[in-house]
Amino acid sequence: MSLELYTLPGCPYCAKVEAKLDDLGLEYVEHVVPGAHSQREDVREVSGQTGVPVLVDTEHGVDGMAESDNIVAYLEETYGG
């Protein structure tokens, strides 16, 4: 699967992206990150920052898209009907 999502439990922005992924019937790999920003090296490596959610879409060359609104718009544009 080409979609990966870095998330944090209880994060409303992450939930917004997960809902869009589910609405579109997309499968993805979820990476749950630690609560402390200082422990999110994997997120920093893919996106250059430590906030979540972060989307990786290897099939379309997206290496680490941040900001839930941007991710939702991208998913709709790329995978929407």
Image: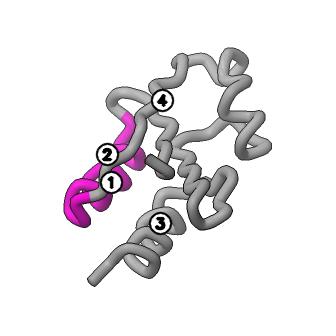
Pointer 1: what residue?
16
Pointer 3: what residue?
69
Name the mark nearer the viewer: 2 or 4.
4
Looking at the picture, how far across and down is residue 77, in whole percent? Answer: 44, 81
Say which quadrant the C terminus sits in.
bottom left
Number of numbered discs on residues: 4
Cα–Cα gap, marks 2 and 3? 12 Å
Name the mark nearer the viewer: 3 or 4.
4
Give the amino acid at mark 3. Answer: Asp
| Disc with the residue nearer the chain's start (3 vs 1) | 1
| Disc with the residue nearer the chain's start (2 vs 4) | 2
Cα–Cα gap, marks 3 and 4? 19 Å
Give the amino acid at mark 1. Answer: Lys
Left/right placement of residue 69 relative to residue 43 reads left
Name the mark nearer the viewer: 4 or 1.
4
Circle 4/circle 1 CB separation < 8 Å? no
Pointer 4: what residue?
31
Give the amino acid at mark 4. Answer: His
Pointer 2: what residue?
15
What secondary structure is marked by label 3?
helix
Residue 22 lies in the magenta stretch: yes
Cα–Cα gap, marks 2 and 4? 13 Å
Circle 3/circle 1 CB separation < 8 Å? no
Looking at the picture, how far across and down is residue 57, in whole percent? Answer: 56, 56
Give the amino acid at mark 2. Answer: Ala
| Disc with the residue nearer the chain's start (2 vs 3) | 2
Please tell me whether residue 42 is drawn above or below residue 46 in the rendered image: above
Q: Which residues are magenta?
A: 11-25
Crowd band around label 4 with a 10 angstrom C-alpha radius: few (<14), some (14–19), many (20+): some
Residue at image coords 49%, 63%: 71
Crowd band around label 1 with a 10 angstrom C-alpha radius: few (<14), some (14–19), many (20+): some
